[in-house]
Amino acid sequence: MINIQDIRDTARDMLTKGEARIVIGYRRGTRGMLAEPTFITNPEQADELVWDPTCFHNLSLYLVHDRKFLAHMRQNPGAPVAIVAKGCDARSIVVLLQEHYFKREDIYIIGVSCEGTGVLDERKLAPLLNGAHATNAAFDGDDFVFTTEVGEKRMSAREVLADRCLECRTPYPKEHNIVFGEDETGRQLEAPFAALTRFEAQGAGERWEEWSRHFDRCMRCFACRSVCPMCYCDECVVDSITFPVTAGTTAEEKASRIKWIERSATRSENITYLMTRAMHLAGRCTDCGACERACPVNVPIRMLNNKMEREAREKFGFEPGASIGGPSLVASFLDSDPGDFIR
Amino acid sequence: MEKILDKKQVDSWVAALTEWEVHGPALEEGIWTYQPTNGKVRLDHPNTKQSPKEFAFPQREIFFSFEQIKGEAPRLKQIMPKEQRHAVFGVRPCDGRGVPRMDKVFNDHVEDKYYTSRRKNIAYVGLACNKPPSSNCFCLSVGGSPVSTDGLDVQMTDLGDRYFVRAITETGKAMMAAGGKIFADPSAAEQKQVKQTHADAVAYPQRKINDPDGAPAKLKASFNSPLWQEMAQACIGCGICTFLCPTCHCFDINDEVHNKAPLMGQRVRTWDNCQFPDFTMHSSGHNPREGTGARLRQRVNHKFQYFHENFGMHQCTGCGRCISECPVGIDIVTVVNKVTEHAG
């Protein structure tokens, strides 16, 4: 079991000694039991930090924000950013390091092991609470325990755990500077890619029908893109301005910009958006599930990413976020590649 | 007009509304949305994921189509919404109060014909909230109430096995008249019960904005507060808060080209969102709302200051959607409270 005091002490210590310029972690939010991201610069704030099954967010997104901010302000990083990272989050950081998005020495990873469980899925929880509102969530080693206005409610992990956590293969952050919690890798409740496998067992017609419904529902709020640490491009095909405009950009350049995707949230445009995103995440997505959780209309976005992840795994034995120095999926070539087209 | 409707008779009432296309809450893929009822009305929803603003202000509105054949004059064809009456059932009071606010935007000193031609054909049949459907409800803080009738044509109140149904507008009266004998006159006991139910609903604890009346002036004084950036640090810049909001109304207009030669396409209005980084991007590359703090301030100030200055009312109706659905916990109640407490 993780003692939150250890995380707080680490944060306080680093900030006091100037070993970190900021600690990115979780604190209790103002809406019910849910945690929210926090950005601590003052050692006295360290006691705000929490660690519980509502710490859903992949905070490595904020390393990307920080890096963009520094670039914009033309500032040097100075002391590292310390960040609380779960297994999946730490693998995201590894991918970002692999892509040289920032330097290893500029990041201090405070690893937290999910210890064989993971984070909640609020959408699974809501109907089980029968209209009651939970004010606290905890994991006692066997079950999840919720404090509500009508007393304590216990639920098994299988009932309320997020799908990605049920299928998680690496709940322990291998890449870290310091780590809390036991390595309980291998305690997953479902086989990897279980949801994808179930989906693919259907016929082509049913699969098309199901995804047509999902594509139609998408409102294009771009929460999936915005919450994803891998979606860091300065130019995104969906934006109305699809390239960085500077004072030197000519009117011709602006007028002749290619409009890949219309603003309308129609099926064709939504397919183009979601498929483009899935392709660009191949070999990079660590299945943190942030996109699917953020989606307000329950599009099962993970399934698209899982499909790419499984292809890479089966065809090339590739595991995203496994090692900083390792090759990247789309930027490396094997002499043993069976495809002729590439030679 | 005040009547009693047996719960088993709701579908018969809907069947009697032959001139209307009736929509109601439906649970699909785990989310509540408004769908054509096909004769079956469900009113056991908390609140819908999206507000009913889409009926008068759809996410995509085609203004006109265009065609340009070389050497000829361009041909434009205006495309107006179809003349069809829509009745929306199960509208919660907060979303009802969104309607007059949208009317202010689209039909005050300037009439937006696309909006008004849809709006005049829509009837909102409300359902009072006996208990706040979300833990983030705060309608009482913004001049509303769980039993408000603003913006509604009919108000229904759940009395267990019956509904107490009240016509608010002439349209509402006509709709109830269409039901004829399905409705019964309320007894004195039922009148008393609905009064009590409404009183209990208003007494139910909600989240609270501490100084809504002082907010416009205090927000104005806090424009340069460092709190904005602090509170928006986690913001990811997505469109959830605005797209789900019953009163957010910003839009973008684009020409969608479907054919190059001859040039053919449509001019289309789509929802836009002040939290997108490119929302205020100038063609020079300068962005006056560069950071998330400036964007959060825009959304909050629009609701609690600018709109108030323009129309004398808050633009927020306290539905709590932006709070419940924000992926990173940005909470408009906390934001307004914090800024107003630190003002001056």
Image: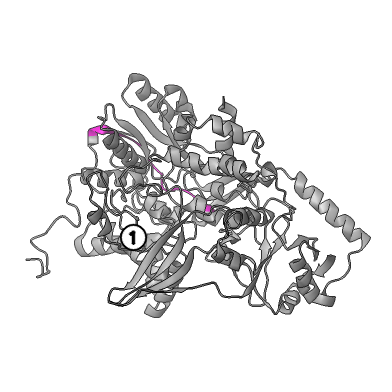
Query: Among all residues in the image, which is located at the extreme right?
Result: B188
Of the 4 image quadrants, the one containing the C terminus of chain A is bottom left
Residue B158 vs B209, above or below: the answer is: below
Of the 4 image quadrants, the one containing the N terminus of chain A is top left
Q: Is residue A38 left or right of residue B317?
A: left
Residue B263: image location, x then y, percent: 31, 74
Quadrant housing residue A23: top left
Q: Residues within 10 Å of mark 1 (few under 14, many from 20)?
A: many
Q: Is residue A337 left or right of residue B159?
A: left
Depth order, front residue of A11/A96: A96
Quadrant housing residue A314: bottom left
Q: Is residue A112 magenta?
A: yes
Q: Amino acid at mark 1?
A: Asn
Q: Is residue B173 left or right of residue A342?
A: right
Q: Which residue is mark 1?
A: A305
**In the image, what residue occupies the spot 40% across and 80% down?**
A205
Residue A133 vs B33, above or below: the answer is: above
Mark 1 chain:
A
Numbered label tally:
1
**In the image, what residue occupies the spot 10% across and 70% down?**
A341
Identify the element where label 1 is drawn. helix
Residue B76: image location, x then y, percent: 42, 73
Residue A263: image location, x then y, percent: 39, 61
Depth order, front residue of B71/B22: B71
Asked which colour scheme the image uses, the reply is one colour
Residue B322: image location, x then y, percent: 54, 48
What segment carries the magenta color? Answer: A105-122
**In the image, what residue occupies the spot 41% across and 51% down?**
A290
Q: Is residue A133 magenta?
A: no
Q: Is residue A338 left or right of residue A223?
A: left
Depth order, front residue of B220/A281: B220
